[in-house]
Amino acid sequence: MKYNFVNKAKKLTPADIKAHMNFDSVVKGASIWAGFKIGSALLKLGTKVSTAVVAGTSTVVVTAAVVVATNTDLLKSSGDSSPQPESQAIEELLPVEKDSVTQEETIVAAKVDSLDANAVQPAPLQTKKPKKVSVPVVTSNNSADSIKAEDIIVEARPLPDFQTFKDFVDRELKYPVDPIGVGINEETEEKEALEGYVEVFWTINKEGKAENFKIRKSMGQAFDNEAIRVLKLYQNWQPASFNGSAVDSNLRFKVNFRVK
Amino acid sequence: MTKSNISEYTEIELIEKAKKDKRFFEPLYKKYFEQVYRLVFSRVQDTDLAGDITSEAFGKALSHLNDYKFQGYPLSAWLARIALNSCYDYFRSQKKQRYVSLENYVSHDIVFEIEIDDNEKELWLTMLPEVLEKLKPAELELIELRFFEGKSFAEIGYILDITEGNAKTRTYRILKRLKKHFKRRTS
C-alpha cells in the first residue's frame, strides 16, 4: 500500500477551521445524499473480513429460507470454488471462519439498528466470489503514477553514482591490523581473521555534508573506526530533497570486511 | 414540554428534533465541526479539500439522520465513521493517496508500545515509511484512531464496523508486527 508521507503535519488555526464552516450549504447539500448509502464498505480490513462478512450474511439469508442443507453447501462452495491464488489467503481463511460466527450474530442483532446493514449485505450470488468484494479497495492502490505530482521526495545519494561510492569504499577500506579485531580459533588456538560487516548510520545535511556517524551493528572497535574513517573520506553527496528543497536525511550502509 | 432556548436541549433531544427540522442540527454542527474537520485534514493535508469532505460528511449525516439511533456511542463516532468513509470514497474515486504524518509515530504512547529507546527514535523515523506501507488502510486507521485520536476500542469498533474485541486484538497484532519489523532491522 502506498501512502503519502509527511514528516510534519500542517498546523491548523481555529480561524482556518471556522472559515470552512457553512451550515447552509450543508443543509442544501443534504438533499443530494438522500439516496446514498453512507456507510459504504470501503474501509474493510482487506480480503479477510470481506470474506467473513459475506459468509456471515449468506448464512443469514439462507437460514431465513429455512434450508439448512443448502446453507452448508453454500458455505462450502464459497470456500472451494473461489479462486484463491495465494496459499496464505486460504490459511488465513480458517481462523476467520470462527470470527464470522460472532460477526454473524452481531449482524443479526444489529440488523434493525445498524445504519448500513444493507451496505454490507451483498446478494447471495456474490458469495461465490468473495474476492470480488475487495476489488475496489485494491484498484484504488494500484494507480500510483498519477499521484506523485504533489510531494516529491528524493533520497540522498552519493555523486556521481552509487557504484562509484561503493568502489571508493572498497578501494579505501583496509583490514585493521589492530589485534582487537582478530579472533582466536578455539580448536587450533591460532589467530584467525574475522569477516563480516559493520552497519553505519549517518546524516546527510542540507548542504550535502555527511555527519553524525553512528554504528548500528558493530564488529568491534577497530572495524567500526575503520568503516567510519572511510565513509567520512567520501564527501560528495547530494542531499535529500522534499518538493525541490533540500532537507536533512539519514542513510544506512553496510561496510563489508573480507580477507583477500 | 416546550423549551424557549435551543441551548437547553440535550444532544439526544436535539437529534430527535433535527430529524423533523434541520435547523436543530446547527448546534451539533458547530459542536462537532472542528473535530471532524481535524480528522479529515490529517488524512488529506489540504484545507479546502478537508472543508469539502467535511461538508459532504455532514450533508450525508443530515440526510440520513432518520437512520441514526443512539447505541451508546457519541454522535461524534457516527460522524467520524461517515467522514472516514467519505475520505476513502474520495481517495478511491480521485485515485489519490492518504497522507500519513510521521511525527505522530514517535509520540510517547506508540514508542512505548513498540519498546523504542530514545536514542533509537531517529532510526525508527527513517524506517517508518517502509514499515507503514505494509499496512492496509484500515489497519493504519486502527492505530491512528487508538493512539492519535485516543478513542476507545468500543468506539473504534463502531467506526470501522467491527466488534470491540476484534478492534483490540487487531490493534495489538499490528503493534506486534511493527515491533517485529523494528527488532529485525536493529538486531
Image (cartoon, coloured by chain):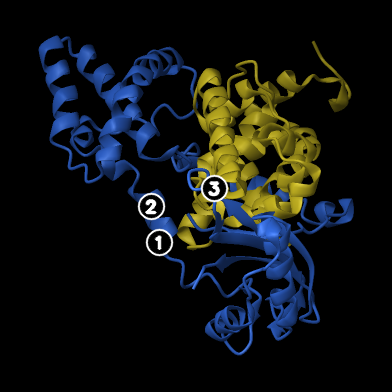
SS at mark 1 in the image? helix
Left or right of B82 on screen, residue A126 = left
Locate residue B106, reporting x and y percent: 75, 46
**Mark 3 touches mark 2? (CB < 8 Å):** no
- Identify the hue of chain B: yellow
Q: Quadrant of the C terminus of chain B?
A: top right
Task: Say which label, 3 or 1, has the lower sequence index.
Answer: 1
- Identify the hue of chain A: blue
Instruction: Give above or below for A69 relative to A124.
Output: above
Q: Residue at x 21, y 42 (%)?
A: A84
Three-letter amino acid code at disc 3? Glu
The one nearer the camera, A244 or A258, is A258
Q: CA distance from mark 3 to mark 1?
A: 59 Å
Rate crowding at label 3 as few (under 14), some (14 to 19) or many (20 or more) other CA atoms within 10 Å. Answer: few
Residue on which disc 1 sits: A142
Q: Chain of mark 1?
A: A
**Same subunit, tags 3 and 1:** yes
SS at mark 2 in the image? helix
SS at mark 3 in the image? loop
Three-letter amino acid code at disc 2? Val
**Same subunit, tags 2 and 1:** yes
Q: Chain of mark 2?
A: A
Residue on which disc 2 sits: A138
Q: CA distance from mark 2 to mark 1?
A: 7 Å
**Mark 2 touches mark 1? (CB < 8 Å):** yes
Rate crowding at label 2 as few (under 14), some (14 to 19) or many (20 or more) other CA atoms within 10 Å. Answer: some
Residue on which disc 3 sits: A189
